Amino acid sequence: MLFKKSNTTQSESSDGSNVKKPSRKGNAHYLTAKESREIAKSNARAMREYEKKKRVKNVDESVYTCQMQDENNIVEFDDLHTYFFTDAGVSKAVDGVTFSIPKGATVGVVGESGCGKSVTSLSLMQLVQAPQGQIVGGSIRFNLGDKAYDITKMPMSEMQKIRGKQIAMIFQEPMTSLNPVFRIGYQIDEMILLHTGCTKEEAKARSIEMLKLVGIAAPERVYRCYPHELSGGMRQRVMIAIALSCNPRLIIADEPTTALDVTIQAQILDLLREIKDKIDGSIMLITHDLGVIAEMADYVVVMYAGRVIEAGTTEEIFHNPLHPYTIGLQKSKPVVKRKVERLYNIPGQVPNPIDMPDYCYFKERCDRCIEKCNGEYPHFIQVSPTHRVSCYLYEGQENKGGNADE
């Protein structure tokens, strides 16, 4: 019996545990039944170990307390690895992501579908689909002001205390995020009651206040409505109200305008920008839309195949893109008053996340390859204090005063 997937062998993950890695031996497109069983056994062992770590109770706070590299950052992702243990092998959805989100700033994370944007944000929230999805290495340092926590080491019971209160997420599709059998007011009240300890009357007053803040007319009526009674734009405003109800230090906005028409998109973006200034918080904005990034973000992180390939300020990424993939993304965006027969598209396919190559992941699609691209994966080159790129084309152009983690 054969399965149309990649052959695998035993290898070691970033944290030292054994995971199944695709092999180059034999037929590269199939797994035998025996190999499939071996993968299942290996995955089961690994998943049990990771789940056991997360469910440990009475963990001393010193275990997950850490020190921020820069106190001006609200979050620091440091060599984050998040894998999915599948029947075909281990999928490296996030494979060594490193970047920071400064206090009071908006950081846009951009890249094509499947590049690891959403999985990175779900790792920060500890909402990766378990037991198949697990954070297997790296750290996520979150700044609470007087102390900092490493999210990857926090037990689930402690994470629930800051999820929603300190870190809030606006999900991509509000209709699937809101519970269809509960009224809007109940769902906002739940968040407030869970984290503030106020009375039901105070929670209701706060909920109506939040509905007013996000620009919903007749908030008392909407408070009593069910999700299906609201339009898409109103449901997204409700999601924002829920996210902001406890004044979080960080808001994660995962494609917040994807399902909305252009007029409503503009209103939601204006609302996010206005509210960020009111609560003096930070935003991690995940989107495919380069126009949204240009309008909203202070810093931009470009991801490809589970890794950050370029990062810098919005001006640097849009006016001086360096990585061939970043340049390709910008060329594929339609421009007003420019007539073209066909929009540019980057040729080729993203490599299989279960069988990632040792060299640059973009090599097979790149039109500017050099001989060195056949070697190991390129390291980051700091071309300015705020701009870094993972590409051999810019070796020798390092800015000696730069900080690779900015």
Image (cartoon, rainbow, N blue to C red):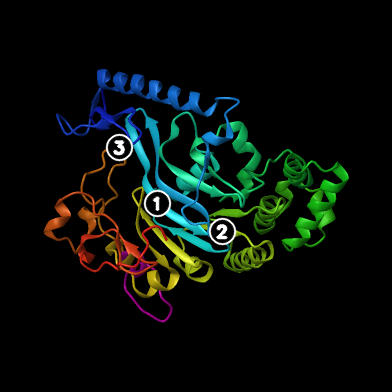
Q: Is residue 1 visible?
A: no
For the C terminus, the quadrant is: bottom left
Give the residues drawn in magenta, as a range: 328-342
Residue 15 versus residue 286 in the image, above or below: above
Q: Nearer the viewer, residue 338 or 203?
A: 203
Say few, some or many: other residues with alpha carbon within 10 Å of mark 2 (under 14 / 14 to 19 / 20 or more): many
Q: Is residue 346 above or below residue 198?
A: below
Q: Do callouts 2 and 1 mark residues in contact (Cβ within 8 Å)? A: no
Instruction: From the viewer's perspective, tell me whether residue 168 is left or right of residue 322.
Output: right
In contact (CB < 8 Å): disc 3 and disc 2? no
Q: Position of residue 78 (x, y in %)?
A: 41, 48
Within the magenta stretch, is there residue 340? yes
Please name which of the two marks, 3 or 1, marks the residue nearer to the observer: 1
Quarter of the figure with residue 192: top right
Q: CA distance from mark 2 to mark 1?
A: 17 Å
Q: Quadrant of residue 162?
A: top right
Task: Tell me the amino acid under the disc marked 1.
Answer: Thr
Mark before the other along the chain sequence, 3 or 2: 2
Residue 141: percent from left, percent from top:
50, 47
Q: Main secondary structure of the magenta part?
A: loop
Magenta highlight on residue 2: no
- Counting residues from the start of the chain, the first of labels 3 and 1 encountered is 1
Image coords of residue 72 (percent x, y): 53, 60
> Mark number for residue 98?
1
The numbered dot on residue 354 is 3
Which label number is shown at residue 34?
none
Is residue 78 found left or right of 273 in the rendered image?
left
Nearer-the-camera pick, 113 or 275:
275
Is there CB contact under 8 Å for labels 3 and 1?
no
Q: Which residue is mark 2?
A: 283
Q: Left of 323 or right of it: where is 251?
A: right
